[in-house]
Amino acid sequence: MGNLFGKNKVLTAVFISGRGTNLKKLIQFSKTKNSPIKISLIVSNNFKAEGLKYSLKYKIKKYVLAINDTKFEDKVLKNLKINKIKFICLAGFMKILSKKFIKNFNGKIINIHPSLLPKYKGLNTHEKVIKNKEKYTGCTVHYVNYKLDSGKIILQKKIKILKKDTPKSIKKRVLSVEHQTYYKAILKIFSVI
Ligand code: GRF
């Protein structure tokens, strides 16, 4: 498949901090013929991240560092370089990346966020959506820039909020929509050229 980066699948790292359900879906997608990316590294700032099990299951390298490691970014950047990583998907990665880090991967880092950005940046989106009596919510895949949850939007998927919804029920439904949206956003990016 031809894409922005040439003929071969783009070597990609997924950054996680927790459960990793988006990671799992991205791995499954990356194994399909249609996928422009190959996930060859999982990075985490949490040794206990549940999603790290997919490293073993799918035989993908992992690189885990403590969140308070003062050299976190330098070490990760070095590791990404060694592994020839050209594209990064953040999937529940709970650490804000510095300008310097982002500059190193300018336009090559994307994130998934559980709200219809620009609304409800940051944490606890589902609680806020209910509190503000929104009619709709959803998820957004966007480029990562220097401001939190503010980069250019690649793809959004909207769902209707039901009367009986709670933050918990919305979270569940949004998550399942996330799983269908993240890979579509990747297809969208790489079919630009
Ligand atoms: C997702 O809701 C994602 O939008 C947010 O963090 C959550 C990660 O879930 N950034 P999982 O680890 O992929 O299951």
Image (spheres, helix red, strand yellow):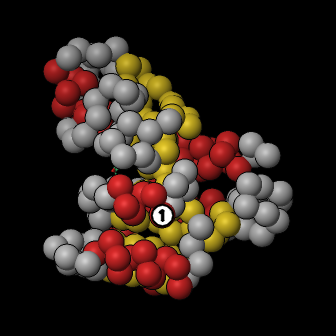
The residue positioned 25% from the left and 40% from the top of the image is: 122
Q: In the image, is 157 to the left or to the right of 168?
A: right
How many labels were placed on the picture? 1
Mark 1 Cβ inside 8 Å of ligand 1 = no
- Could you say which quadrant of the image residue 150 lies in? top left
**Residue 155 spot, x, y in % from top left:** 55, 35
Q: Decide if residue 162 is in sight here.
A: yes
Where, quadrant-wise, is the N terminus in this rendering? bottom right
- Could you say which quadrant of the image residue 71 lies in? bottom left
* Disc 1: CA contacts within 10 A as few (<14), some (14-19) or many (>=20): few
Q: In the image, is 191 to the left or to the right of 24?
A: right
Q: Decide if residue 39 is in sight here.
A: no
Question: Viewer-proximal residue, 42 or 5?
Answer: 5
**Residue 113 spot, x, y in % from top left:** 38, 42
Q: In the image, is 141 to the left or to the right of 101?
A: right
Q: Is residue 57 above or below residue 99?
A: below
**Residue 18 spot, x, y in % from top left:** 29, 63
Q: In the image, is 99 to the left or to the right of 81?
A: left
Question: Viewer-proximal residue, 170 or 106?
Answer: 106
Q: Is residue 90 above or below residue 123?
A: below
Q: Is residue 177 above or below residue 87?
A: above
Q: What's the amino acid at mark 1?
A: Asn
The residue positioned 19% from the left and 76% from the top of the image is: 70
Could you say whether the residue bearing mark 1 is in a helix, strand or loop? helix
Question: Viewer-proximal residue, 26 or 74?
Answer: 74
**Residue 80 spot, x, y in % from top left:** 49, 77
The residue positioned 19% from the left and 31% from the top of the image is: 127
Write down the residue under mark 1. 104
